Structure formats: structure tokens, C-alpha cells
Amino acid sequence: MREKGVTFSSAPQSALMSMRSTLITVITLWIPLIPLMWLLYRQLSAANSPAKKRKPNSETVGFEDVQGVDSAKVELME
């Protein structure tokens, strides 16, 4: 551009404009990320909940428990 004789210059950006562009950048980055981070937090906290850590109650069913129900007895024998 200097060889062709074009004049150019730049003015320093004002502090207000600089803060404005930074704020816009932060808002456009964080607004979509906040719901995603919230969902991730909920998933991680649900994975560590006491309800998941509880072992299922494994009671055995015997013939005395199904007295009088012939189909249950046959199924239990199988």
C-alpha cells in the first residue's frame, strides 16, 4: 500500500469500546455454556447419589412363600 501511495492510519480503541467488545465476547461464550454446565453437574451429582449406591434387596423366594399358588410353584421349580 505504501508503494502505491495509499494513506492509512488507525486510531486507538477507546476503553469503553474495548470493555464492550470484551463483554459481548464473554456473554456469547457463557450463555450457551451455562445450561450445558448445569446439566453436566446434575448428571455427575446423580451418579454419586446414595440411591445409586444402595444394593438391591435380594430376598430368596421359597416354596413356603408361594403356598397355594400352583403356577408360582411350577415357575419356581423351573
Image (cartoon, helix red, strand yellow):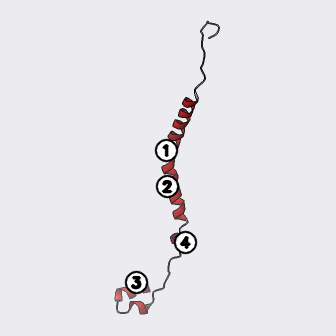
Q: Are marks 1 and 2 in contact (CB under 8 Å)?
A: no
Q: First in sequence: mark 1 or mark 4?
A: 1
Q: Earlier in the sequence, mark 1 or mark 2?
A: 1
Secondary structure under tag 4 reads helix
State how far apart marks 2 and 4 are (Cα).
21 Å
Disc number lying in front (1 or 3):
1
**Type of amino acid at the residue the image marks with label 2:** Leu
Residue 3 image offset from top left, x and y in percent: 64, 7
Instruction: State if disc 4 and disc 3 touch (CB < 8 Å).
Output: no
Task: Give the residue number, with chain letter if any, for mark 4.
Answer: 53
Assign a secondary structure to mark 2. helix
Residue at the disc numbered 3: 75
Which residue carries the number 2 mark? 39
Q: Where 70 falls versus 4 (above or below)?
A: below
Q: Which residue is mark 1?
A: 31
Precedes in sequence: disc 3 or disc 2: 2
Residue positioned 53% across, 74% down in the render: 54
| Residue nearest the viewer, comparing 35 with 78 | 35
> How many residues crowd mark 1 within 10 Å: few (<14), some (14–19), many (20+)?
few
Residue at the farthest right position: 3
Classed neighbour count for the residue bearing mark 3: other residues with Cα under 10 Å, few (<14), some (14–19), many (≥20): few
Q: Amino acid at mark 4?
A: Lys
Labels 2 and 4: the sequence-earlier one: 2
Disc nearer the start of the sequence (1/3): 1
x and y percent of residue 63 in the render?
Answer: 43, 91
The residue under label 1 is which amino acid type?
A: Ile
Residues packed near mark 2 inside 10 Å, few (<14), some (14 to 19) or many (20 plus):
few
Q: Amino acid at mark 3?
A: Glu
Contact (Cβ within 8 Å) of mark 1 with mark 4: no
The quarter of the picture where the C terminus appears is: bottom left
Q: Nearer the viewer, mark 1 or mark 4?
A: 1
- Separation of disc 1 and disc 2 at Cα? 14 Å
